[in-house]
Image: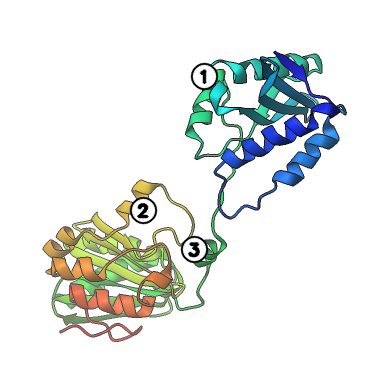
């Protein structure tokens, strides 16, 4: 039997609602608002809220609470059946009666909230035809603060060509740089340890141009070229090219600028095999040093990390704090 609760039923309503809240395994950061919610139900009883009781043999076995929450929307705030009466269709009977009452008020859609961890209830609601309307997401403040923090630090970068032919690199740079933008000064140095380094103020100002120049030089010279730099003093990024094709890409904090699809995050992890084959780096050292994290705080400071990576791949720098190789 399903019937509307009255003021005389308040003790039963309180008992069933508290049992309902006790069973919910809410997130630990949330306050227990059982009494506040119960007070709202009591105030709404007989004043526009639908508070239904399910009874069997004159004993209360279920509770449902809903209200008209908009012109065409109803909201089911509570649905509870005692454990011993579950599986017998009592919950469906309660909702069926609520639907009839809300429909008479012009309600076209019934909404409810369910905990993401309550898989059993979610399965039932989906079987009845409920579909997600809105997702309520949560994140610890400490984690957000760490992930969203911005460091105030330098942005710089350089390109490294695996060759001893400095003249060929200079000529290729002279052809490529005018297409990228105006440059205040370019230096081509080396070779050191089999690498010729290219520095340019334009590349320091615009780190996105690093891989573009590296790709052009790799294609023009038909060899291995590495673009590497630091962004905002927080992220170390490199792109490795061979004969004009991108073969490896790395970012120390892949989601520093915002969330990425999982596949993109994985793709921004260094490939030790490729890096070893093309630069002669020790794969074990690559795995040890060239790591990714969700926050800069989990890694070496970016200016130290880029020095460590430079040492692993064997490039030598005169500026920007890179550690000399060899």
Label of residue 265 in the image: 2
Tags 1 and 2 in contact by the CB under 8 Å rule? no
Residue under numbered circle 3: 147
| Mark positioned earlier in the residue sequence (1 or 3) | 1
Q: Position of residue 79 (x, y in %)?
A: 64, 28
The colour scheme is: rainbow
Label of residue 87 in the image: 1
| Mark positioned earlier in the residue sequence (1 or 2) | 1
Q: Position of residue 70 (x, y in %)?
A: 79, 29
| Residue positioned 85% across, 29% down in the render | 7
Quarter of the rendering containing residue 131: top right
> In terms of depth relative to the viewer, which is nearer, 139 or 154?
139
Tags 1 and 3 in contact by the CB under 8 Å rule? no
Q: Position of residue 297 (x, y in %)?
A: 42, 72
Kind of element beneath mark 1: loop
| Residue positioned 66% across, 28% down in the render | 111
């Amino acid at each position: 039997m399903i019937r509307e609760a009255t003021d005389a039923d308040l003790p039963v309503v309180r008992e069933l609602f508290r049992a309902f809240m006790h069973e919910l395994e809410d997130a630990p950061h949330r306050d227990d608002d059982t009494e506040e919610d119960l007070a709202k139900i009591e105030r709404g009883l007989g004043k526009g809220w639908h508070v239904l009781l399910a009874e069997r043999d004159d004993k209360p076995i279920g509770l449902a609470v809903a209200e008209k929450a908009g012109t065409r929307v109803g909201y089911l705030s509570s649905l509870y059946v005692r454990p011993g009466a579950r599986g017998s269709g009592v919950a469906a009977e309660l909702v069926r009666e609520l639907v009839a009452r809300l429909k008479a008020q012009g309600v076209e859609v019934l909404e409810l909230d369910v905990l993401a961890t309550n898989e059993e209830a979610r399965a039932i609601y989906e079987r009845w035809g409920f579909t997600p309307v809105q997702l309520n997401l949560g994140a610890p403040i400490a984690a957000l603060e760490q992930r969203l923090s911005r460091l105030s630090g330098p942005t710089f970068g350089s390109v490294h060509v695996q060759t001893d032919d400095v003249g060929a690199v200079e000529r290729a740079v002279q052809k490529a740089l005018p297409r990228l933008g105006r440059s205040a000064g370019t230096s081509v140095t080396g070779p050191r340890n089999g690498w010729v380094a290219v520095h340019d103020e334009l590349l320091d100002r615009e780190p996105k141009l690093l891989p573009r120049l590296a790709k052009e030089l790799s294609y023009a010279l038909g060899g291995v070229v590495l673009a590497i730099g630091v962004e905002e003093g927080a992220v170390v990024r490199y792109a490795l090219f061979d004969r004009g094709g991108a073969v490896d890409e790395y970012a120390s904090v892949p989601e520093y600028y915002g969330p990425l699809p999982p596949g993109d995050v994985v793709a921004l992890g260094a490939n030790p095999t490729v890096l070893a084959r093309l630069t002669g780096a020790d794969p074990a050292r690559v795995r040890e040093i060239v790591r990714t994290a969700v926050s800069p705080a989990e890694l070496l400071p970016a200016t130290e990390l880029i020095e460590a990576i430079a040492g692993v791949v064997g490039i030598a720098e005169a500026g920007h704090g890179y550690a000399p190789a060899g």
